[in-house]
Amino acid sequence: MPDHSFSDLIRQRGFMRLWTARLFGTAGNQMLMVAIGWQMYDLTGSAWDLGLVGLYQFLPALLLTLVAGHVADRLHRGRIIATCILTQATVALVLVAATQGWGAVGAWVSRELLLAVSVVLGLTRAFQMPALQALTPTLLPPGLLARGLAFSSAGTQSAIILGPAVGGLLFIAGASAVYAACALVFAVACALILLLRYGHIPPQPEPATLRTLLAGVAFVWERKVLLGAVSLDLFAVLLGGATALLPMFARDILHEGPLGLGLLRGAPAVGALVMSGVLTRWPLRRRVGRTLMLSVALYGLCMVLFGLSTGFWLSMALLAIAGGADTISVVVRQTLVQIETPDAMRGRVSAVNSVFIGASNQLGEFESGVTAEWFGPVGSVVLGGIGTLLVAAMWTRLFPTLAGRDRLDVLAMQTRPAAASGPSSPG
């Protein structure tokens, strides 16, 4: 497999257009979530309600996973993504109207409305993520995939830095200003996706039977490297995430306002952006399995220390290091999933992967809210970080072929002898 350079990557016009659209779409989503989270906490002051925002986004994705994956393998993936982004723009406009009010009708934003739009956002994510993940490899030659995914991560993390910071700054002018900006950013992303051209070949008609819907699940279950990779993300981030509790940390522990919240939300992306740049310039070559496990363990350690921190800048630094560690994990896992899955199956496999990602993020936010009600925000984050450290240790033994994976590309797949002789994985 030839070793392509970064200049080869940026000459891929279709990929770069998708990359730019993803940049705008992610920034808009991050701004939206900052405003919804802060507005919810303003309305209710409840950690439980902050957790519900994540849960209400996750449940639709869970229920529609199999359908969304089948759709991504049957229909034009670019149009699916554009429709999802347009829906998010509509949500932002509804929130502008609800927060600002119309004429004699005053503001009608409420806890129930914020939870309802969370469900809509979950529905769009259910279809957008599999289509987006499945589309990316079709725009790149195999030799550029790992570098391209790292560069995509760099763009995404740039948006995650910019989005919350801008959202927190705009929130000074009111939530409606944030929502209006989100609608504009989503419109740009949608236009870029509609301009995207790629070689879509409609597959042969095939009825949506239970067997075809479950094909992605079966594919991942039979390949223990993939099963270990996607489940590692699920349990590590499910336990170790702290995003939903950042409004509580910003206001009650670190004594910061909306801008401080935006900076905290963007801090993991700073580390992730730096690491994405490193991985784009110097892709991982050897011992990727061991590196994956160590990165997850480092993420858990940072979460423990973040939970104990009472200094704003120390908390920012720990979140940044955690973001860099998570990026290593993301690039390794996403490259493994895409490079070992045929294009005809990518939508359904990406849908399964999206559920694991969504569970780790949105369900993780709900878990954080519940445990914060029981143990307080500090106890929730510290216990979650310890859980992530235990997961990294357990997965090293449960999935030795993943932990011992030497290289990412299939043609040179190797494992260390010690890993090959370890215990077999479950299932």
Image: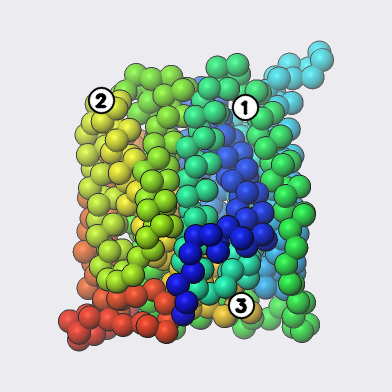
Q: Which of marks 3 and 1 is in front?
A: 3
Answer with left or right where residue 14 lies relative to residue 195.
Answer: left
Q: What element carries label 2?
A: loop
Give the mark, 3 or 1, whose residue is nearer the N terminus: 1
- Indicate whether 249 appears above or below 357: above
Residue at screen point 53% across, 74% down: 142
* Circles 3, 2 touching at the beta carbon (< 8 Å): no
Q: Which image quadrant is residue 33 in?
A: top right
Mark 2 nearby-residue class (10 Å; few <14, some 14–19, many ≥20):
few
| Label 1 Cα neighbours within 10 Å, binned few <14 / some 14-19 / many ≥20 | many
Residue 393 relative to residue 115: left or right: left
Q: Position of residue 281 (x, y in %)?
A: 41, 57
For image coordinates 38% across by 79% down, the residue present is 224
State the quadrant of the C terminus. bottom left
Find disc 2 in the rendering and name its residue: 311
The disc placed on residue 365 is none
Tell me which amino acid carries mark 3: Asp
Tag of residue 178: 1
Q: Are marks 2 and 1 in contact (CB under 8 Å)?
A: no
Who's the residue at 42% across and 61% down the image?
331
The Cα atoms of the two marked residues, 3 and 2, are separated by 48 Å
Three-letter residue code for mark 2: Gly
**Residue pointed to by mark 3:** 343
Instruction: Give coordinates of residue 248: x percent, y percent.
Output: 38, 28
